[in-house]
Amino acid sequence: MDQLKQIIRDIPDFPKKGIIFKDITTLLGDAKSFHRMVDLLAHRYIGEKIDQIVGIEARGFILGAALAYKLGTGITLVRKPGKLPSETRSVSYELEYGSDTLEIHADAFKKGDRIIIADDLLATGGTMAAVVELVEEMGVEVFECAFMAELEFLEGRAKLPDGKVYSLLKF
Ligand code: AMP
């Protein structure tokens, strides 16, 4: 696990001053690390009845698609406004400055589907909390929120359903 953590690169002051950005592209670009990361996360869910993976734009698509392939499910995309072509449902949530909106296709699920929501990194938890709200209103059961990495000091998991958060690499 330490090897995987070390390959994630810190970029200070990106995208703005005071933020230390965890750059996962170095992990994704390294064959051994990428395979290990996907295998470790997928292993956690093998044997569970999972109907669908939900990936959050954009880096959540990478982990989401890899998990869906490994678990033999489909992947549903949560996207920025105006990107999905059919009828959508949306959720808006507060950011540090202003707010943001995410959309999903209205017919993405069957009632009672058990899903995993995938994203690259858990920071404040605002994005994932909004997606949990969005999909729960559509009548699905969130089995777990899965992340490659988590910034524990931001306590993002406090915003998410108790006991339904897993991150592989904790910083
Ligand atoms: P949050 O809603 O605060 O949990 O973060 C939303 C998204 O912003 C995450 O899925 C990450 O892709 C990205 N993000 C936030 N903070 C960082 C960070 N320090 N390094 C890399 N990505 C980040």
Image (cartoon, rainbow, N blue to C red):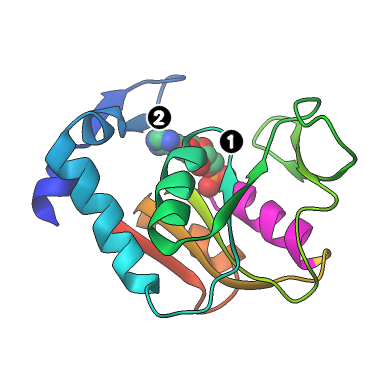
As drawn, the label of residue 57 is: 1
Disc 1: residue Cβ within 8 A of ligand 1's nearest atom: no
Return the x and y of residue 160 as percentages of the image width and height. Answer: 59, 66
Q: Say if the magenta span includes residue 58.
A: no
Q: Residue at x 34, y 63 (%)?
A: 42
89 left or right of 63?
Answer: right
Q: Main secondary structure of the magenta part?
A: helix
14 left or right of 27?
Answer: right
As drawn, the label of residue 92 is: none
Of pointers 1 and 2, the one earlier in the residue sequence: 2
Disc 2: residue Cβ within 8 A of ligand 1's nearest atom: yes
For disc 1, the neighbor class at 10 Å (few under 14, some 14 to 19, many from 20) is: some
At label 1, the amino acid type is Glu
The magenta-colored residue range is 122-136
87 left or right of 1?
Answer: right
Q: Disc 2 marks which residue?
A: 19
Q: Residue furthest left?
A: 3
Return the x and y of residue 4 as percentages of the image width and height. Answer: 16, 47
